[in-house]
Every structure is written in C-alpha cells, then in structure tokens.
Amino acid sequence: MLWRMRALMLLTGVFCMLYFGLQPLMELYEEKPVVAAPEEVVFINTSECHVSGPRKPAAYFMAIEPVCRLRCHMPQLIIAKTQGGSNFLVGNGVAEDLQCRYWLKSAGDLRSRKYLPDGHFDMRNGAMEEIRVGTGHQIVRIKCSNQSNETRYHDVHYFLPPPPEVQSKATSSPEKMSVIVLGIDSVSHMHFMRYFPLVKAFLENQPHTKFFGYSRVGLDAYANLVPFLSGLSSRDLQSKEGTWLFQNFKAGGYSTAYGEDRPRDIFADRKGGWTPPRQLADFDLTPVMVEMETHTRYSIDLKERILCSAGRTFQEVLGDFVLKLVPHMQQGPFFSFFWQSQGVEEYYEYASHLDLSYMLLLKSLLDANVLNNTLLLLMSDHGLRAGNYRSSFQGMREESQPLLVAMYPEWLKQQYPMAMENLEKNAHSLITPYDLHETLRDVISLGEMQDAHIEVRRNNLLSCPKKKIPRAVSLFLPVPDHRTCDLAHIPSLFCFCRELTEVPTDDGLVLRCSRFLVESINKLVKPFGRCRRLRLKMVLLAHFLDFGEESFVYELRLRVRTVPGNGEFEATVRLSDAILLTSPISRVNHYLAQSHCLSDPDFKIFCFCM
C-alpha cells in the first residue's frame, strides 16, 4: 500500500514538473489572437460624402484561358544597343545560320512610310556578332531566314541614343520639377491593392500619397484623359480650343515624351480640329508600335488583345522606351506620358503579370536619380469596364474608383510645406482628372507652391460660395469638404456618394425607364443606318439613388439587356416632368465583332450591325 502511495506521489510530481516546466514553452507556440485587418477600406470621407468598400474582392469567374500562360512564344534572337555613337544589332542565342535583311527609318521619317535603302547581314550559329546599322534616332525592322528560307526572326527595334554628354542635373531642390505619368488602363484602386504587392512595398519606402477618392468623369480612357491633359471635358474639346499639357510644359522649358503599348493611340478616330498630344511630343513611341502592328505582331490570347513582336510583349516594348529615355530625363526638366492598356482591359487577373515589371521600372528610375526631382503619377482611368467581375456589385463600384498614387521627392515637403500638407490631406477627398490638370499646371511654376501663394489661393477658394467652387482645384490646395459629385462635374452613373437602394426589376416605373434607355440607344445609332434596332429583353438591375430627405429628385440606376446581341448597358435616368438621361450610357459586356460596320468608338458600343 505504501509503495502505491509513493508511486502516485512520484507520478504527480513528475506531472506537475512537466506541466509547469513546459508551460512557458507551450505559451510560446500557443496561437495568439491576431488583430484583424479592417474589412472595409475608406475611400472618401468628407462632410458630403462617405464611401467605403470591402478589402477582399467579390466572387468572380476565372478567365476563359489561364492568364499565366499568356507569354510570347517566339525567340528574341537579336537585341539592339547604342555604343560610341553608333547603333548595333547583336545576336542573342542564335541556334542556326541565318541570313537577315533590315530596313531603316531615320528620325525625320519615323512617321512616314519612307525607308532608307535596305541592308543585309549573316548571323552564324552561336555567334554574338555586332552589326552596325547607323547612328542617331532610328527604327529598324529585321527579318531573318534559315537555309530553307523559313522565317526564324522578325522584329522591330528602336534606337534612342543618349544625349552627347550625359550628366545628371538633379539637385536637392531644382528650379523645375519633372513629371512622369505611368498609366495602366482599367485598374481600380482596390484592384491595385490586390495585385501589385511588390509595387506597394516599393512605395512604402518612398514619399507618396494614395488618393482613395479619385473618381472618373467619363466612360473610357479618352473621356477621362482629355480632362487630365487639357482641362476640358471631351465634349467641350469639340467646340473649344484647349491647350494640352504637352504645350504648357514645352512653353515652360520642358522636354516631352509620349508612349502607349498600342499602335492606335487613345486620341485616334476622335473628331476635332486639335492636334493629338503625341504629335506635340519630342519623343513618340507610336511610329514603332505602328511598324510592329504592320509587319511583326502576333497575338497570344483568344481575344487577340495581347500582342507580341518576337519575344517581347508590346507592354515590354513600352517599358524599354521609358528606360531609353532615362539619360534624357537626367539632362533637364521632362514631362512624359506613358499608358498601357493591353491585357488589363480584358482580363481581371492579368494585373498580376505587371507587378514585377513596374516595380523594376520604378527601381530603375530611383537608381538613376530621376525620382529625386520628379513628381510621378501612377494612375488609371477607371476600373474594369466589362466581364464577369464588372457585373458584380463590387465590380460596378470599382469601375468608378481608378488608381491614383503620387510619388515625390522628400525635399518637396521641406521646401513647400503648406502645399504638400494640403496634398496629403486630400487623400480621402473627392477629386477628378480636372484637379490633376490644375495640379500639374502648378508644377510648371513651382513659385505657385510657396506658402504665401498657397495661403492667398486657399483663402480665395474657401471664400467661394458653396455652389460656385471651381470645377478644377489644384491638389496643393485643400479640396473643399462640402464638394459633391455635381460640384465636381461627376455624372450620376460614376458617383457613389449617394446610397443605392435596390428596387424590383419588374416595377412598372423601372420598366418604363428601361424602355426609355433602350430607345435612347436607338436614337444614337439611327443616323448610321447600319445598326439593328434594339429591344429591351430584360432589366438586370435597378437601384434608387438617394439624394436626401429634402430632395424631390427621383433617379434610377439601371442595367438592361437588349436583343439582338444580348448587349448589357447601364445609365442613370431621372424622373421629373419628363424622363431624362443624367449620365452617359455604358456598355458592361464585350461586343467583340458585333459592331464591325462602325469605326467611331463613341458609337461602336451600341451597334449590332445588320
């Protein structure tokens, strides 16, 4: 009996020793309560508008084809470089003997179809030969064939030699500050937050401000970039004489550059007597993209929206153009506008392809000391405009919440404290492309950002009657807290300051307004005579827009489907003595070849060709 008691006491002691001895170690590995990240992101927080949204995306269907497989499948057998004042083509992994022919365009002929006399050269298996093709600013197209006369390589290269003497003029506080616009089409702010972790991490180590309240004012890139680059709406530009920022910066002593990753720029096929912005630039990538489109391009996706030339996507060609400009940016003040649209316009997940390339591009600009005297805008025009994700309620909201981030050197905050304090405080204000235009006009004349000037301009702005504040407010000034979508010239369809209340789609008033919407589309395309008359098939969504208890305005946001063609369209309709459209009409599904008989981009979205 005694031995049993002793054994029990021993076991109890061992248990206590093990339990209390190991308890600190157990606590070390014990799961701790983690402070959860906020589920909501605040976009706008003013007295007149509060907009927030979920941090996680809404459910959506995957793309028809895996975007991870969308890679150029042709080899990049030749690279181009400029050395010692001459332009060279260099072999890169050539696995067989090739006979090559090339065609040159010089700086004066870039926009024409005129070629210099062509040339020939041979590339031997495994050789790293350097073929001199000329000097200066040139475009060269190369086509190489093997012994069986099979084409093995067809590509276009662009030579942009550095200035004669490259030396950085960046100082701690230059007299003029450069501007770089890096635009990515169809990327909402939350889309960026989800798919660009590397760029986000890079930004966290640089002075920057994210503008959560940036809103679009038009349907497409054209309607949002015209206000940004000219200060006018796209409609006003047809009747008024505007001045592009390219002209303003050139008058201020800046060099300028324009680049897109497609051959037809944003402003192509638009009516007006104005000169397209790219033709005002000192350096323009468009002739290179046109040459690729004409001779060497091939598509890598089913929709034929993502293009390659040899082993490079058109987006990579645009990135290379930016890097070729770095020595010129180091020479003096520079205004450059770059815009990417391929891939991101069509595929929600394609943004994940871009994160690394944009982070490396920003790092290259940082390492080259370009960002030390540059205001860089990383921005978009709107969120995704069509597809499964866009059809969700969250996707509908994000379409009107484009990306906008401003990066700037640290010295700017020290030299212009009041202006930069206002800029950072505007992070959750309701702002538009008109405001960006006014902001960049201030950058041309840095004297306008001195505290004394800012104080005077601030007082003048705050003294304006509530309903007469200007359409465009520089972000170096405090954007008025009482600003509304109407005061900011944001159409109802793009404004989420007003609460949306879902209403039954079979309501009599909803059906009446939906038929009016479809009839409005028919009136738009009737003059063309080549489009089928549309009929209302069904009302997909209907929301009542809340204007407040004191308002007698009754407005509906509608999404309808029409036949033939199953087009899906959205607009806002106001009911008063008559039914009125209060916004542009947006198409929210793809129309592909349905509108082949029209070329006007303003009307293609509505037309089902006969």
Image (spheres, rainbow, N blue to C red):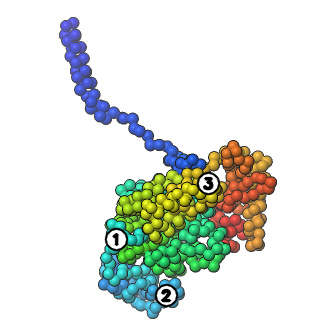
Where residue 590 sits: x, y (%)?
Answer: 63, 62
Q: Which residue sits at x=75%, y=62%?
A: 520
Q: Of the residues shown, which amino acid type is indicated by label 1?
A: Ala
Above or below, 132 against 362 in this view is below
Q: Which residue sits at x=46%, y=70%?
A: 444
Q: Of the two numbered discs 3 and 1 on the same chain, state the one appearing first in sequence.
A: 1
Residue located beneath label 1 in the image: 170
Q: Of the residues shown, which amino acid type is indicated by label 3?
A: Lys
Determine the residue located farthest toward the top in the rendered image: 1
Is residue 256 among the parts visible in the rendering? no
Is residue 516 among the parts visible in the rendering? yes
Where residue 529 sits: x, y (%)?
Answer: 76, 72
Lateral position of residue 66 relative to residue 268, left or right: left
Q: Of the two numbered discs 2 and 3 on the same chain, state the one appearing first in sequence.
A: 2
The crowd level at tag 2 (other Cα within 10 Å; few <14, some 14-19, many 20+) is some
Give the number of marks. Answer: 3
Residue located beneath label 2 in the image: 109
Q: Secondary structure at mark 2?
A: helix
Residue located beneath label 3 in the image: 466
Q: Are marks 1 and 2 in contact (CB under 8 Å)?
A: no
Where residue 566 sits: x, y (%)?
Answer: 70, 59
